[in-house]
Image (spheres, rainbow, N blue to C red):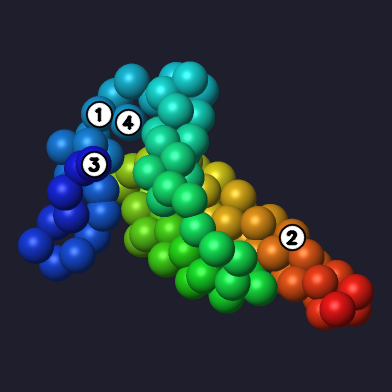
Amino acid sequence: HAPAEADGAWPCIPVRDAIETIGTDAVMGSFSNTIDNNRGWYNGSGGSEENILASKYRSFAEGYAIEWPKTSEALTAVANLYARKALAEKARAESDQFYN
């Protein structure tokens, strides 16, 4: 639930700094899981929504790699999660089309 910076960068700098300071696997894993859980329930999109989310989080991760490497790592994990979900959704949609 952290706010974005004025320029749209997310999460805000104090959250990035906290992740870097604490930086345990548990904190980074909880951060990543919470992002996914906060998405809530959704209808299948054939993977398009998940690809958009993967791109969004990968972009944030790439921008933070030098100054906030642990935050970048956590956001990369989120991006990878959504990329995997996109593939699964695409496969599910193709399977549904095949059987319908």
Q: Which mark is residue 19?
A: 4
Q: Which residue is mark 2?
A: 88
Name the residue furthest right. 99
Taking the spot 32% from the left edge, 31% from the top edge, the residue there is 19
Q: Amino acid at mark 3?
A: His
In front: 9, or 46? 46
Which callout, 3 or 4, points at the residue further toward the start of the chain? Answer: 3
Picture coordinates of residue 53, whole percent (x, y): 47, 64
Quarter containing the N terminus: top left
Image depth: mark 2 or mark 1 in front: 2
Q: Secondary structure at mark 3?
A: loop
Residue 4, numbered circle = none
SS category of the residue bearing label 2: helix
Residue assigned mark 1: 18
Real-space Cα distance between discs 2 and 3?
27 Å
Residue 98 appearing in the image: yes
Q: CA distance from mark 4 to mark 2?
A: 30 Å
Separation of disc 4 and disc 1 at Cα?
Answer: 4 Å
- What amino acid type is highlighted by mark number 4? Ile
Q: Is residue 58 above or below residue 78?
A: below
User: Is residue 58 among the parts visible in the rendering?
Assistant: no
- Residue contact at pointers 2 and 3, CB within 8 angstroms: no
CA gap, disc 2 and disc 1: 33 Å
Disc 4 + disc 1, Cβ < 8 Å: yes
Residue 48, image quadrant: bottom right
Residue annotated with mark 3: 1
Residue lying at 19% horizontally and 65% vertically, measured from the top left = 8
Horizontal placement of 96 versus 10: left or right?
Answer: right
